[in-house]
Image: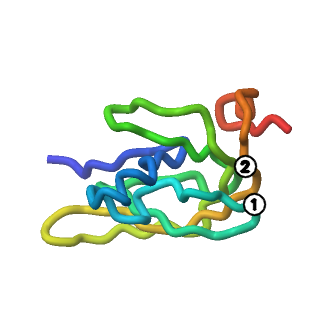
Amino acid sequence: MGIQVEFNPDLALRNISEYKTGRRKLEECVPDILEEGKVYDFLKKEQRNYWLDGEIPLVETTGNQNLSRPKASVVILEATHFKDNGESYTRGKYKVTAVFNDDEIHFENLTRIK
C-alpha cells in the first residue's frame, strides 16, 4: 500500500457551467471572468502537488485528462491537503498573471513564452 499523490504541471478546472447547474463547487471551476492580478480559490479532489516557484497554465478540463489550451497563466500561492467524508482534497489559492484570449502558444513545457 502506498500514498497516492498526483503531480500536476497545470491547474485544470471545470467550465463554470458545471457550477451553474449545481454539479460542482465554484472553486472547482474556471471563473466566468478572469482578471489579471486577482487571486482566486481552487478545489481539487485527491492529493495534488503543484509547482509553487513560477507560472503554470490554467486550463479547462472536461475530465479524463481532456484539457483546453491555456486560459491564463497563474501562480499557485498556497495548496493544502485535507479530508472530508473520507475523501482527500487539495484546496488553495492562485493568482492570475496573464489572461489569454487567443490561440497563440503561451507555454512550452513549464516555460512561459512572453
Disc 1 crowd, CA 10 A, few/some/many (<14, 14-19, 20+) = some
Q: Amino acid at mark 1?
A: Glu
Q: Which residue is mark 2?
A: 99
Residue 82 image-quadrant placement:
bottom left
Give the number of marks. Answer: 2
CB contact under 8 Å: marks 1 and 2: yes
Q: Image check: 90 left or right of 10? A: left
The residue positioned 45% from the left and 54% from the top of the image is 16
Q: Which residue is mark 1?
A: 36
Residue 94 place in picture, x, y as percent? 60, 63
Q: Image check: 72 left or right of 9? A: right
**Is 54 or 93 nearer to us in this picture?**
93
**Is 50 or 1 nearer to us in this picture?**
50
Location of residue 19 with respect to 63 vertically, above or below: below
Quadrant the C terminus occupies: top right
Residue 19 place in picture, x, y as percent? 36, 59
Q: Image check: 19 left or right of 99? A: left
For mark 1, give the secondary structure.
Answer: loop
Q: Amino acid at mark 2?
A: Val
Residue 51 place in picture, x, y as percent? 58, 52
Residue 110 place in picture, x, y as percent? 66, 37
Q: Rounded to the nearest whole Å, what is the CA distance between mark 1 and mark 2?
A: 6 Å
